[in-house]
Image (tube, rainbow, N blue to C red):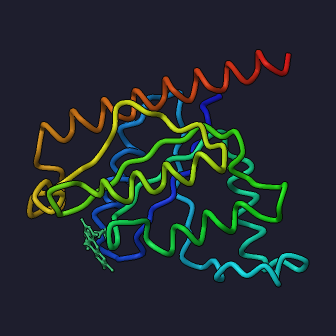
Amino acid sequence: MPHKIAILVGSLRAGSLNRKIAELLVRMAPNDLSLEIVGIGDLPLYNEDLDENAPREWQAFRERIRASDAILFVTPEYNRSVPGVLKNAIDVGSRPEGASVWDGKPGGVITVSPGAIGGFGANHHLRQTFVFLNVLVMQQPEAYLGRADEIFDESGALGSERTREFLVNFIDAYARWVTTCLAAFQRAVA
Ligand code: FNR
């Protein structure tokens, strides 16, 4: 059975570069991964007052993440940090206290931007959050995809062979990371 990977995309924009990269990764992934984008745009803003009677969108989202073996974040940087829509999804998944869906999940991050530094700020702010949430995030290879508005040709296909190789290498390394983490976890509970 392939490992089930939930992809969270930090942009809701119809023409999102991040979504295009996420869709490419779904197709490039090796056979031992099954990737699916989980929508986050319909999640009501997190509010502790709603914890006792959680909105059905929160419940469905938490279930989907809980049922995944690992998570992959593909996100732009907004104002040198994580877009609010993605931070909201992370906060929703982290509660109620003691029932976080992120705890112990293997993770990966790729940030995608038309800018030169490839969303470095968002990438590392996410990593800071993952320390607290105990997401086992892959460290290497790091993935800051800059100048991302230049890598697709007029038909919308990936025009850059260098970027294709980079993405294949990234998703192969991520697959190995997920397999290693899950095997270590199974040994620990055996
Ligand atoms: C941006 N953008 C941006 N880019 C960047 O590299 N660093 C940044 O801090 C920001 N800040 C920022 C804030 C806000 C509110 C917006 C709307 C945009 C530009 C951003 O990278 C660009 O719009 C990307 O194309 C967004 O990703 P998608 O929607 O193409 O996936």
Quadrant of the displayed image that contains ligand 1: bottom left
The quadrant the N terminus occupies is top right
Q: Is residue 70 left or right of residue 143?
A: right
- Say which residue appears at 53% left-offset and 34% top-offset: 33
Residue 12 placement (x, y as % from top left): 42, 75
The quadrant the C terminus occupies is top right
The image quadrant of residue 28 is: top left
In the rendered image, the residue lying farthest to the right is 52
Q: Is residue 133 left or right of residue 82?
A: right
The image quadrant of residue 168 is: top left
Residue 126 placement (x, y as % from top left): 48, 55
- Say which residue appears at 33% left-offset and 60% top-offset: 18
Q: Is residue 13 above or below residue 74?
A: below
Q: Is residue 84 left or right of residue 88?
A: left
- Say which residue appears at 34% left-offset and 38% top-offset: 142
Residue 107 placement (x, y as % from top left): 54, 41
Q: Is residue 162 above or below residue 15?
A: above
48 and 183: which is toward the camera: 48
Number of callouts in the render? 0
Q: Is residue 73 above or below residue 28?
A: below
- Say which residue appears at 58% left-offset and 20% top-offset: 180
28 and 186: which is toward the camera: 186
Residue 74 placement (x, y as % from top left): 41, 55
